[in-house]
Image (tube, rainbow, N blue to C red):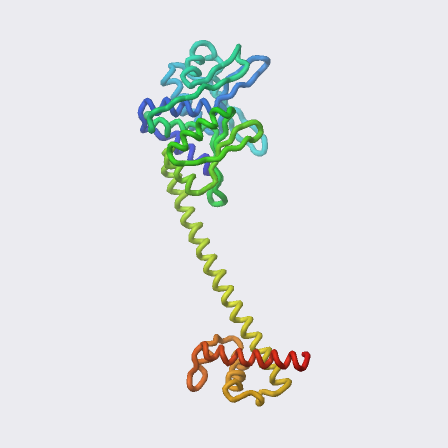
Amino acid sequence: MSFSLEIKRELSRLDEQDVCCKKSELAGLIRAGISLRTYKGKPRLLFITENASLSRHIYSRVKKFYRDSPDVFMLKTRRFRTHTLYHLEFTHLMGDTVHNILDDMGIILRGKGEDLKYNNYTIDNRCCKRAYLRGGFLATGSISDPDRSYHLEITFPDILLADEYMNYLKDFGIEPKQIIRKGHYLVYLKEGQEIVDFLNVIGAHKALMKLENIRIIKDMRNQVNRIVNCETANLEKTVNAALRQVDNIKLIAKTRGLDSLPDNLREIAGLRLENPDVSLSELGQMLNPVLSKSGVNHRLRKIDNIADKIRSEDKI
Ligand SMILES: [Zn+2]
């Protein structure tokens, strides 16, 4: 099951709100999700969803508030993969009842159903704002699988609806962005923390916990990667330095001979040739008396310098 579907299931089973909130949620749902289609020259008012529990949820809310209900059709489609679409049809309520619903939702059906216009939908209570935001997400929202990326978006048919939704989000300290895609207005969030805050506002607490867990694991994985990368870099540096030292010592042995070196350098050169893959401090431990890491480094530097000199003088 996709993460979107999981959240929507959780949200449409949520039933702990006051009547004021229930109505605001329905407004959020209908305003974002209802569309006007023409079928055989006649207008149809539809709410289309893939989500069975959401279609039941809307059906029962409408019935509860308006004592009338939309018709529900199930449609199997075979685009990309077989899936079921639920059509909630409000057309037969186009008489008084539907106008009632639309009036309540701040939607105006113009003429004999040419198009839909939207009034502002004013909400005062914070609890109802949360419910309205939840409704919008339920209607047209989607979220990417958090294992892959963080992206949450809600689409609206009208810029007024998108702006209004953004303003209600801002009341909770969430600053979304907006773009237009294929004539629709998209409100979206791209930060993990903002998405967590959003899920909290709309009351998707199970989904929130899941997302937080994924974020923690991702963070830990990133940290481990950083440490491993850092250790790998250090290791590479050490190995490269040792290879360079061995090359230089061999060069000296071939040209001037190791006997040309003063005792302290000859000793360390011999040890390095025998132990090309030990660290500087380990080399120091092999000497008698023991020499510190920086002491070893100092001697090996001198050997490097001698080799460089041989290279420049002998043009090797
Ligand atoms: Zn309320």
Q: Residue shown at 55%/81% (left/top)? A: 303
Residue 296 visible = yes
**Considering depth in this image, is 299 or 130 the residue closer to the camera?**
299
Q: Is residue 240 above or below residue 15?
A: below
**Considering depth in this image, is 254 or 50 the residue closer to the camera?**
254
Q: Is residue 252 above or below residue 160?
A: below
Q: Is residue 104 above or below residue 304?
A: above
**Considering depth in this image, is 6 or 281 the residue closer to the camera?**
281
Quadrant field for ligand 1 = top left
Residue 1 visible = no
Q: Position of residue 267 (x, y in %)?
A: 51, 86
Q: Position of residue 275 (x, y in %)?
A: 52, 79
Judged from this view, the residue extending furthest toward the right is 315
Q: Residue shown at 39%/18% (left/top)? A: 63
Q: Position of residue 260 (x, y in %)?
A: 58, 89
Question: For residue 15, which quarter of the picture?
Answer: top left
Q: Quadrant of the C terminus?
A: bottom right
Q: Position of residue 102 (x, y in %)?
A: 44, 16
